[in-house]
Amino acid sequence: MLEAAAELFAADGYARTTLARIAAAAGVSAETVQGQGPKAALLIAAIEHAAFGISGEDDILNLEVGRALVAARDRDEAIDMLVRAHTRVHQRSARLAEALIGAAHADPELDRYRRNLIASVTLQQRRVLEAYHDRGWLRTDVPFDELVLGFAAVGSTETYLRLTACGWDVDTYQRWCRRMLSETVFAR
């Protein structure tokens, strides 16, 4: 059901996706879909499932991807791993993020979720960068909080959507992202 919801939200947006259409696509009754909660809850669950494969984990370091990121052996491996991890998340969830952004303008619950998601993602990025900071891999001429926000901006879904909407393919996006992280966040 979540996969059907995710596909419809991504393809048609939040407003045009109905619980009845989700039910039909999932091959279940409308009552079954309604039993999962309101449409906003389905969008939230679809985003978390698509992006991370789970829902409700508060610490990236408890996930395999987080443990792998902090296990990087050197600066260059860390940058490559970050770029690949961000790209995978964006490829799975960017179109759902567009649906969320559009819906958040009209739905206070989804707007609250969007703001909390941004704060949560930034916190997760901070945790990873703290590990790199402790190893001396980050710039020291820029305040740490600024490095975190710069990293968040470079790796954000909005940045990915903007660049790919302008015609960049994934390889071009990854090269740019790698260069931006190398120049703005990591020490040379």
Image (cartoon, rainbow, N blue to C red):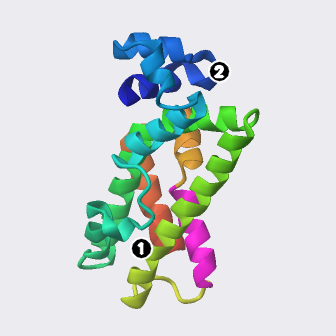
Seen in the picture, residue 36 relative to 121 is either above or below; the reply is above
Task: Work out whether mark 1 precedes mark 2 in sequence or the reverse, and give the earlier one.
Answer: 2
| Foreground disc of the pair 1, 2 | 2
Quarter in which the N terminus is drawn: top left
Residue pointed to by mark 2: 15
Seen in the picture, residue 143 relative to 55 is either above or below; the reply is below
Q: Amino acid at mark 2?
A: Ala
Q: SS at mark 2? A: helix
Label 2: how many residues lie within 10 Å, few (<14), some (14-19) or many (20+)?
few
Secondary structure, magenta segment, majority class: helix
Q: For residue 57, which numbered disc appears in the image?
A: none
Mark 1 → mark 2, Cα distance in angstroms: 36 Å
Which contiguous range is marked in magenta? Answer: 143-155
Q: Residue at position x 44%, y 47% from top?
A: 173
Q: Is residue 95 visible?
A: yes
Residue pointed to by mark 1: 128
Residue 152: x, y in percent? Answer: 56, 62
Any magenta on residue 86? no
Seen in the picture, residue 184 relative to 51 is either above or below; the reply is below
Residue 136: x, y in percent? Answer: 40, 89
Seen in the picture, residue 7 relative to 111 is either above or below; the reply is above
